[in-house]
Amino acid sequence: MKIEHVALWVRDLERARAFYATVLGGSAGERYLNAKTGFESIFVSFDGGAALELMTRGDVRSADRAVEREGFCHLAVSVGSEALVDEWTERLRARGVTVASAPRWTGDGKYESVVLDPEGNRLELTV
């Protein structure tokens, strides 16, 4: 068994698509629209087979991402090396992306940084 994709509710589908496809280098599929329900989604695929479904609908409320809560915590992306974690972190910072946690070694032996996507979701960049 493998996880086929992860889905995120977003307020601004196009802004989220641009971040994950243009900024992070994923490949965005076609926008799906269910005109009856107002549900829209776009799948963004990444090297190695991972996929992210970005979804929106007018009646979905936004969550307070400033506090820890049960449920989704972060999305981790392996970039391949310590040097690339540093490089990606600085590249994203230069584009105005919020760096929530600078590159560092964690207590469990992982080298990572954490940035926030345009919706405030935590994206962990790791080896």
Image (cartoon, helix red, strand yellow):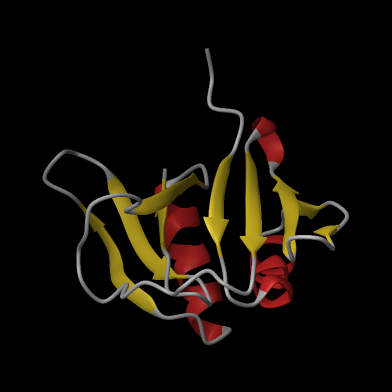
Residue 126 as seen in the image, left or right of residue 108: right
Rendered position, 81 above or below 67: above
Is the C terminus in the top left, top right, bottom left or bottom right quadrant?
top left
Q: For the image shown, how many numbered marks are present on the structure?
A: 0
Q: Is residue 98 above or below residue 5?
A: below
Residue at point 26% right, 42% down?
110
What residue appears at the point 52 percent right and 64 percent down from the top-left corner? Answer: 88
Residue at image point 80% right, 55% down: 28
Q: Nearer the viewer, residue 3 or 24?
A: 3
**Quarter of the rendering containing residue 116:** bottom left
Looking at this view, is 96 or 11 the one in front? 11
In the rendered image of this protein, does residue 14 appear above or below residue 35?
below
Q: What residue occupies the far top of the structure in this picture?
A: 1
The x and y percentages for residue 89 are 45, 68
Which residue lies at the image location 49% right of the left edge and 80% below the top edge? Answer: 97
Give the side of residue 96 with respect to residue 86, left or right. Answer: right
Residue 2, x across and y down, in percent: 54, 19
Residue lying furthest right: 30
Considering every residue shown, the one lying at the far left of the view is 107
Q: Position of residue 79 (x, y in %)?
A: 52, 47
Residue 102 picture quarter: bottom left
- Image coordinates of residue 37 in percent, x first then y, are 73, 61
* Camera-side residue of 19 and 54: 54
Q: Is residue 35 left or right of residue 70?
A: right
Nearest to the observer: residue 73 or residue 21: 73
